[in-house]
Image: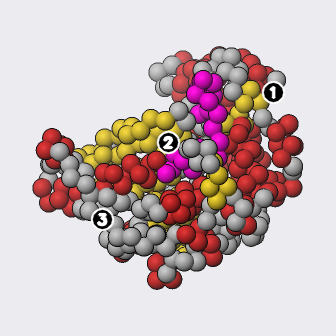
Amino acid sequence: MLYQLYETQRNMMEPFADFAQAASKLYSNPLSPFGQNPFAQRVSASYDLVYRLWKDYEKPEFGIKTVDVDGVDVAIFERVEIDKPFCELRRFKRFSDDPHTLTKLKGQPAVLIVAPLSGHYATLLRDTVRTMLKDHKVYITDWKNARIVPLEQGEFHLDDYVHYVEDFIRHLQGIYGNCHVISVCQPTVPVLAAVSLMASRGEVTPLTMTMMGGPIDARKSPTAVNNLAMNKSYDWFENNVIYRVPSNFPGAGRRVYPGFLQHTGFVAMNPDRHMSSHYDYFKNLIRGDDASTEAHRKFYDEYNAVLDMDADYYLETIRVVFQEFALVNGSWDVISDNGELERVRPEDIKTTAHFTVEGELDDISGSGQTEAAHDLCYNVPKARQKHLEVKGAGHYGIFSGRRWRDIVYPQVRDFILQHHEGPTVKANGNSRATAPKTTSAKKSRQEKATA
């Protein structure tokens, strides 16, 4: 019922938001009679703020058109490589007509970035993707809003998340021979599970696995987010935060954890900070500080755009990761494609180098939670392990912004490059080939201008 009430309220407020937007433009236009009023700028700013508080925020675009590679502008074409019911594997294909740049691009590593499915869209990692594109072939998991997935597509479980990651890894391996994986926040757990299962089966595993700010062991330095998940029962979550999608969406009837509830939780963590930010935005509008107001709009266009998560996936994540600690306790069983239970055994990973990154001031995944992966993957040689704590960085600072670009990324780039050739054996000791498979003549012609 709460979801229906929320949608009814949103629909009722939509015309008022449109009116506020129009009024703001009317008072800010110097050619308008209203714009001649001495208080016009203040009135315009007030209406603009009301509009942004009431408007509906849709999924943003990545909007990455070009990247600079050693002084050369490289064009980016964004396309969907694999379309699954709950996720798209999105590739950022690079184009250049400069022969030297093209040769350099073709030899660079392929990286799968696994974005979090925890309320925001994958575009939250826009800065991560843009920076990585300078030195890598980049793919990212673009998770779909569960409310647009029809019921006939079935449910989505945490096990399905793990299988999606496995399929995407195999897809990149089929093209390039092997790949590197980066997981940010929530997906550190299912990505580690996916690589562990692949190793247990004797499959080729990624050359490197970079895990950033994730709850591998949520018992360490628990944050307010962790405590909520730990202290409330599974039944409490199922009875209080799970609702049916209303009839005006393609996924009508699907059980979900609504995005608006997640957004409310985000804001409730730091209400004073958000209130101060909106007040500063109002003052900057009056002063005509276009740079500051545009920065505010870009941030909140991303921050306020949220998606619904399938109820089964959400509840299972709460239980497995934050209540049973199944990964670190060695008790996590994943249902395979043929219906059999497979135990997640990180100790079976022997060749995948791994790099963990944490922020000193992270208030979502506390200190030591991500680093715990090293204790689980104890059969990986120490020379192929690395940990970084970023001083002064919060959760978002380790994958976006100045600290990401200046401190974290150079080390991630160098770590991937260092292990790009990889070892010559699989987890079960058999030899493996690391060269990409032979491509057709048609594909080779296409690749002459792209990377």
Marks 1 and 2, the one that precedes in the sequence: 1
Range of magenta residues: 144-166
Tag 3 residue: 433
* Residue 390 rendering spot, x and y as whole percentages: 57, 72
Count the labels in the image: 3
Does residue 20 appear anywhere in the picture? Answer: no
Q: Residue at x 53, y 28 (%)?
A: 28
Residue 361's disc is none
Q: Is residue 297 left or right of residue 437?
A: right
Q: Is residue 42 left or right of residue 436?
A: right
Is residue 160 inside the magenta stretch? yes
Tag 2 residue: 142
Does residue 350 appear anywhere in the picture? Answer: yes
Vertical order, 391 against 136 (above or below): below
Q: Residue at x 57, y 44 (%)?
A: 338
Q: Residue at x 49, y 73 (%)?
A: 350
